[in-house]
């Protein structure tokens, strides 16, 4: 590990995110706080909707096609040349190995060609840095809820770079459950946003679905809830689909809001930061506001474009790790599909250069 680098205000970081089905490229300037210069996302959701979910090989091929075009656009629209880039970052886990390999390989090649430093970023840490981009004045400590198609995690953030997992899902991620139930209701992948829209129309108390593990520790479980909705739909094929959507979404967001506010309170924290695609849910925001105001806790949700998968959050995390913690990786860094947040092996091993 090297000494912290001076953080010239002009230092430019180019970041790449390809861990799932979004091809994303961003540029930030400086690190404290980072200034967002470019933020491009190409979503492959329409391509994968045909299959009802993400097909890793299809995602890899499309990252390979789109990534160079997005990098070119990010540079040309901002008038930045590749020689101006001082740091190149890419997500190296967790995620799908093929898609991760595409982004990592591209980032390494770009860094080598531009004689820039290189760093791999943990996707989950990236999600937390969406908060730093949106609200740079609200610093840790805070409780983070990362809630997306792949993750449902409660993370205590004592400082950027210092994380403790407080709760995680023991089966499906919240977004995964939304997408699967949505599919059953005939909504194309990813179903979360449309399900949430229908939830505003339907009656959330029409059907009482279980609130799994609502008052048991801080782990989550959504698989049993998903099964009970499927069973209900089989037995009541003529039920109002908006009522089913509203009742199901109410159950998911009730559990998310209750647990995350309770965890924030029990950890004596005053701020709860919610990131990931499901943070876009209007129903979740309403439940969070209700639950948090009773406890005197403030809830922070970055703008939608920073909540769903994007490279701006990866760039912000990279600029912090490089310019404020003096970290970088050598070009042999491998993808880590199952990377966790508490112990980041790449920063512990000799891979840090
Ligand atoms: O963070 P994200 O873009 O990608 C992953 O890392 O998974 O999250 C995608 C998830 C999907 O499950 C999608 O259905 C859900 O976020 N989602 C929503 C909304 N918009 C996206 N869920 C509920 N309400 C929304 N408005
Ligand atoms: Zn994500």
Image (cartoon, rainbow, N blue to C red):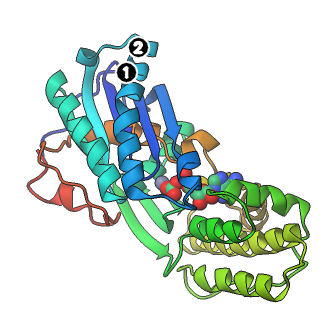
* Residue beneath the point at 57% across and 81% down: 221
* Residue beneath the point at 36% across and 58% down: 96
Give percent across and percent down for residue 336: 26, 60
Give percent across and percent down for residue 42: 50, 37
Splitting the image into 4 quarters, where does residue 344 fall? bottom left
Residue 135 seen: no
In the picture, measured across the screen, residue 56 lies left or right of residue 236, that is: left
In the structure shown, which secondary structural element does the residue marked by tag 1 occupy?
A: helix
Verify CB contact (< 8 Å) between mark 2 and mark 1. Answer: yes
Give percent across and percent down for residue 112: 14, 29
Checking the image for residue 72, the label placed there is: 1
* Residue beneath the point at 50% across and 47% down: 309
Q: Residues within 10 Å of mark 2 (few under 14, many from 20)?
A: few
Q: Which of the two residues, 270 or 319, is positioned nearer the viewer here? A: 319
- Give the quarter of the figure containing the C terminus: top left
Whether 29 is drawn above or below 294: the answer is above
Q: Which of the two residues, 193 or 288, is positioned nearer the viewer here? A: 193
* Residue beneath the point at 29% across and 22% down: 8
Whether 141 is drawn above or below 173: the answer is above
In the structure shown, which secondary structural element does the residue marked by tag 2 occupy?
A: helix
User: Dot 2 corresponds to which residue?
Assistant: 76
Q: Residues within 10 Å of mark 1 (few under 14, many from 20)?
A: some
Give percent across and percent down for residue 143: 53, 62
Q: Which of the two residues, 209 or 31, is positioned nearer the viewer here? A: 209
For the residues labelled 2 and 1, the Cα–Cα distance comes to 6 Å
């Amino acid at each position: 590990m090297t000494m912290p680098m001076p953080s010239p205000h002009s230092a430019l970081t180019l970041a790449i995110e390809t861990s799932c089905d979004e091809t994303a490229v961003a540029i930030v300037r400086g690190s404290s706080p980072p200034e967002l210069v470019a933020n491009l996302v190409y979503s492959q959701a329409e391509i994968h909707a045909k299959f009802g979910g993400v097909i890793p090989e299809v995602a890899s091929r499309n990252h390979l096609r789109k990534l160079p075009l997005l990098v070119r656009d990010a540079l040309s629209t901002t008038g930045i040349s590749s020689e101006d880039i001082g740091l190149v970052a890419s997500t190296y886990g967790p995620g799908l190995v093929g898609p991760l390999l595409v982004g990592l390989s591209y980032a390494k090649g770009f860094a080598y060609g531009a004689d820039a430093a290189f760093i791999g970023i943990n996707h989950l840490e990236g999600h937390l840095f969406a908060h730093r981009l949106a609200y740079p004045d609200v610093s840790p400590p805070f409780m983070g809820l990362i809630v997306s198609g792949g993750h449902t995690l409660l993370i205590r953030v004592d400082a950027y770079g210092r994380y403790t997992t407080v709760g995680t899902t023991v089966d499906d991620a919240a977004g995964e459950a939304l997408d699967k139930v949505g599919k059953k209701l005939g909504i194309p992948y990813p179903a979360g946003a449309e399900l949430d829209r229908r939830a505003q129309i339907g009656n959330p108390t029409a059907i009482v679905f279980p609130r799994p593990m609502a008052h048991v520790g801080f782990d989550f479980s959504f698989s049993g809830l998903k099964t009970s909705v499927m069973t209900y739909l089989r037995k009541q094929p003529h039920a109002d689909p908006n009522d089913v959507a509203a009742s199901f979404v109410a159950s998911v967001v009730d559990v998310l809001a209750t647990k995350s506010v309770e965890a924030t309170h029990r950890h004596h924290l005053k701020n709860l930061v919610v990131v990931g695609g499901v943070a876009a849910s209007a129903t979740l925001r309403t439940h969070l506001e209700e639950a948090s105001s009773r406890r005197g806790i403030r809830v922070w949700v970055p703008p939608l474009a920073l909540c769903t998968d994007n490279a701006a959050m990866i760039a912000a995390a990279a600029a912090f790790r490089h310019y404020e913690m003096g970290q970088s990786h050598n070009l042999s860094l491998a993808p880590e599909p199952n990377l966790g947040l508490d112990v980041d092996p790449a920063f512990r091993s000799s891979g840090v250069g």
